[in-house]
Amino acid sequence: MSRTFAPQAIFFDLDGTLVDSVPDLAEAARRMLAELGEPTCSDSEVATFVGKGIPTMVERALTIGRSPVSPERLAQAVEVFMRHYEDTNGRLTRAYPGVVETLPWLKARGLKLGVVTNKAEAFIGPLLEELGMGQFFDCLIGGDTLAQKKPDPEPLWHACELVGVSREAALMVGDSGNDALCARRAGIPVLLMTYGYNEGVAVDTEDCDGLLSSFLQLPDLLD
């Protein structure tokens, strides 16, 4: 990849980009389904559910191969999932290779770093602290921080405002078409990691400014 970037701030998606959180999400989903008397699901299935936030993930877990559920049933399921995920969050989640090594390097260059994810805000900080990465980030934007979430551009614009950089000086790093679309709508360049989730779709089909197979490749793309 020949193009390089000179951002003042880099905003990262969380699940599938910085961390592999599927084991904890899947365990919480299975506990939820068991409590509700629904058929279980596998880690690989849950990996395809991730990306649009917890309500969408829960709905997908409830309806895979089955009929749609009522809004009341979904609301109940989300509440049950959140309770179980509060217990499982961080237990088996791990940072992807190269993440823990690269974040201090980025901070040492004076870059502002942020997380812009559709994960509920209450789970972001505790997870990053559990993994020893909380100190590297200047802002944390969750799927319920604002009225809008990705792929709406507002979360990225809000992150720019929080860290005090212009949209032209930002870079987004994610793993999915959801991240790419959010960045495109925000007018911010975007790089996608090939090892993430992307709802079961090949990430090389997405409109982005570059693909990375390793987090350690990111510094080479920065001027």
Image: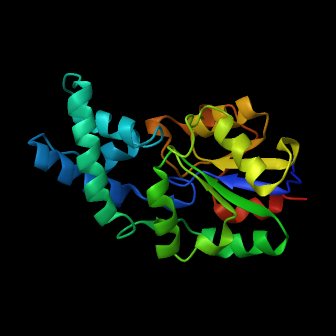
Q: Which of 121 and 19 is in front in this view?
A: 121
Residue 35 point in image, percent of width and height: 12, 49
Residue 202 point in image, percent of width and height: 53, 36
Residue 60 point in image, percent of width and height: 31, 34
Which image quadrant for residue 136?
bottom right
Q: Identify the residue shown where x is 51% and y is 73%.
A: 129
Residue 1 at least partly seen: no
Q: Is residue 23 above or below residue 98?
A: above
Q: Identify the residue shown where x is 67% and y is 36%.
A: 154
Q: Nearer the viewer, residue 125 or 68?
A: 125
Which image quadrant for residue 177?
top right
Q: Which of 31 and 5 is in front in this view?
A: 31
In the picture provided, is 148 more to the left or to the right than 186?
Answer: left
Taking the view exactly as shown, the residue that stands out farthest to the left is 37
Q: Identify the residue shown where x is 33% and y is 47%.
A: 44
In the picture provided, is 44 more to the left or to the right than 169?
Answer: left
Q: Identify the residue shown where x is 82% and y is 54%.
A: 164
Residue 81 at least partly seen: yes
Q: In this view, does 73 lie above or below 136?
A: above
Specify how the rendered protein is coloured.
Answer: rainbow
Name the quarter where the C terminus is drawn: bottom right
Count of labels shown? 0
Residue 96 point in image, percent of width and height: 54, 65
In the picture provided, is 211 more to the left or to the right than 58?
Answer: right
